[in-house]
Amino acid sequence: MTGTLEAAPPPALQVSGLHVRYRGADRDAVRGVDLTVRPGETVALVGESGSGKTTLAHAVIRLLPAGAQITAGAVSVADDPVLTLSERRMRHIRGGRIGLVPQDPTVSLNPVHQIGRQLVEAVRAHRAVDAATARGIALELLAQVGFDHPEVRARQYPHQLSGGMRQRVLIGIAFAGRPDLLLADEPTSGLDVTVQKAVLDQIDTLVHERGTAVLLVTHDLGVAAERAQRIVVMYDGQVVEQGDAAELLSDPQHPYTRRLLAAAPSLRPARLSPSTTRPRPDTPAPAPAAPPFLLVDRVSRSFPATLPDGRRSILHAVRDVSFTVPAGSTFALVGESGSGKTTTARIVAMHERASSGLVRVGDTPITGLTGGGKRPVRRVVQMIHQNPFSSLDPRWTVQRIVAEPLRAWRIGTRAERTRQVVELLDRVGLPASVIDRRPVELSGGQRQRVAIARALSIRPPLLVLDEPVSALDVSVQAQVLQLLVDLQAELGTTYLFISHDLAVVRQISDAVGVMRAGRLVEAGPTAAVLREPQHAYTRALIDAIPRPTTGAPA
Amino acid sequence: MTSTVPRERTGTVSPAPATPPSRAQRRVRPATVRRQVGLALAILVVLVAVGWALRPAWFTGYDPIIGVPLDKLQAPSWNHWFGTDHLGRDIFSRMVHGTATSLRTSLLAVAFGLVVGCLLGVVAGYAGGWASDAIMRVVDVLLAIPSLLLSLVIVTVLGYGTLDVAIAVGLGAVATFARLVRAEVVRVRRSAYVEASVGVGTRWPVVLIRHVVPNSSGPVLALAALEIGAAILAVSALSFLGYGSPLPAPEWGSLVAEGRNYLASAWWLTTLPGLVVVALVLAVNRIGRAVGREWGDR
């Protein structure tokens, strides 16, 4: 479709001057957005949570939550003016013209129906076919989204499928009505990185075969850079920048785009260096001669389990894992969910018992400790939980939360503790004004900072971080990672860092261990492992890091 | 009464959605107004009942025990709001003066159920293992016996005193409380913030008191409010059957029972006291629901 302007088909999606306002809000959540998706084109809509990108996506299919209203603007899909259509016509547009891949595959399928039936339902809603034909089409779709034995799969229920498989089913449903436009709202958040890549590849393949246009809503600029021809950056309800993916990445105009670009872990291969100017006593990577502060020696953890056929068996969550971490350095454990990395971390943090093997912190073996014997070690080992939304007591104030370890160890008087809390908050970059707030009044990034302040209050030499940034927005992720690097430089804390994302790991860790199915399959200095991965699984993980297809930024 | 206060804290909950809902978004709607009026009415009913219990003399001038035989079996009138009984005693006065006994017994019953149930539930939930199994099987047995039957048996053994009746009724509530508390404690105990608290070195009894109990208490308080309604009914039922304060001391259940013989000729003897019991139970339930909703938001 080069040149001939008059023959150009109408855009798959055209949004002009769109305003959306939530009832009672003093300003619009989406403010005057213009957006065009041409047929066959993939456009990424990028922004952090609260930027209005999901509201925009919902406005396009007129599925805004109650209380939200489109106050101005127009949306057209091909030639249909979406905003003025009857609800009856709209049902035809949804699914028929626009396919939706929803955000959370775990809740978007009906748990009591077989997936085949749910696909057939989607097919018959948009095509005038009889049940048998619809079933055939459904099986075909299952095969197209990458299921082997579609007939068997069709009879399975959602709970029998993994998150990635469920998302494939949803992609199949999105394609059931042969849409011209695919609306993918964070289709891979919450999935393992390797699965994420597979799902995005699946979307790419189908889109390519059918010439479907895609509006990909994502918070990850890395994903956008890899998948989209054009990128639209949203911030605070407005489009702040849009353009060709390669150009936008190599020459970002708006400061917010630059910030996003700097925050995207996949676009930033280097290890973060401390931002403090204060001179440090030693180099970031300690000399290899440094004695190991944490020693994990042939640690295993197994659970009794019941197989689907009723037989008793033993599930090995962690098998013979050994590694050492020198004082003041960061060791990262990487792997997908179920690989045993979190169990290993919990054993080190004494929240889980090892079935066999030895863990030594400093000179203290901690694996044999029971009951009260663990308590003294808790001053030495602190853990940051994955989800700052659940690791802080919702009824406590920040002051009480951060002071809890001090109180537990009877450190200082009440007034001294309050002073220390203010200091700690300052150190993790929080204003003293949050001291009387409760967790619900804080954002995710602020909560994780509170959790870090709590852990640091008793100055533990070892900090176990269980996916500390995976529940956070990319830009917040970058800030928290930077904070961790700075604190390490300042306090000399040793980190055991758990992550599923090698892109994050390479920013923070000195050494990395790759776990799969309970075993440590590869370990070594981060740079070496990333440059020359020995194990096939490590290579798969590295491949899963999104990389821009064109013009990577310097 | 918590829910008459505007929800300050819960209003700011949502962790930064596309647009944070603001104050005006929760503009008062007709349904909400109706709900608020209903709640205000319920609170008023309960306050009146509490007033009757604490200061009966403020509400009625008639003696509840000594009647005027000439005025016997009068229908409700301006002088005798609820009418008079076969001995010429003012029913309203007997109702008001009986409130203290009936309410005290009901509250004691709920308190007994709450304390014993919570102790059992917390132990079962926090300790787990065989302790939990043992306690919960006992609780299952309690649940299997109809509560009125259980109360009757216990009253027969213990006697008819206020405390005896309270224990008899309260024991029926122990099972319900224990199950709920155990479920809540198990939920809270698994939460990340409890693990984090243990992780920073807090000793477990402290964790239990500072984290587990406060976070488990919401639904339990709501249930307690509902149980007060049930207890009022149960205590009245026992007193109706004759297991209560000895006559002529007035008590709600025995008032209804006394009037039973005159149902054909003097309907007010049973109907009006019965309606008061119904109104109070409904009011307490209404407040219990409001408490439950308030906590459900967290």
Image (tube, coloured by chain):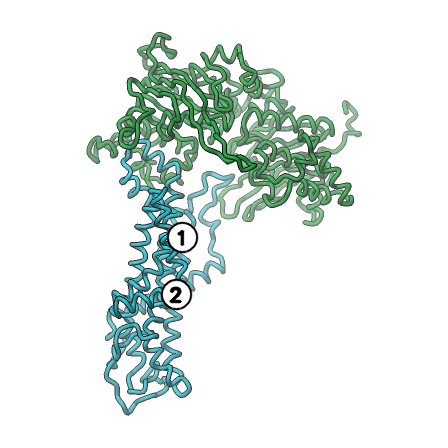
Residue A433, how many percent across, how many down? 33, 35
Figure quadrant of residue A16: top right
Question: Residue at left 48%, top 19%?
Answer: A514
Is B199 located above or below residue A538 in the figure? below
SS for callout 2 = helix
Question: Residue at left 51%, top 39%?
Answer: B18
Q: Which mark is residue B283?
A: 2
Is B72 located above or below residue A332 in the figure? below
Residue A395, how many percent across, how many down? 35, 43
Residue B79 shows in the view? yes
Residue A255 shows in the view? no
Chain letter for the part of the structure drawn in cyan: B
Whichever of labels 2 and 1 marks the residue nearer the N terminus, that label is 2
Q: Are marks 2 and 1 on the same chain?
A: yes
Is B166 located above or below residue A16 in the figure? below
Q: Is residue A16 left or right of residue A390?
A: right
Residue B240, how many percent across, how many down? 34, 75
Determine the residue located farthest toward the front in the rendered image: A311
Circle 1 marks a residue in which chain? B
Give the class, few, some or many, for how many residues have Cα within 10 Å of label 1's Cα (few <14, many ≥20).
Answer: some
SS for callout 1 = helix
Q: Camera-side residue: B205 or A275?
A: B205
Residue B82, how many percent across, how many down? 35, 81
Determine the residue located farthest toward the left in the rendered image: A413
Chain letter for the part of the structure drawn in green: A
Q: Which mark is residue B294?
A: 1
Q: Is residue A457 left or right of residue A196?
A: left
Figure quadrant of residue B43: bottom left
Going by the numbered disc 2, the residue's amino acid type is Ala
Figure quadrant of residue A197: top right
Circle 2 marks a residue in which chain? B
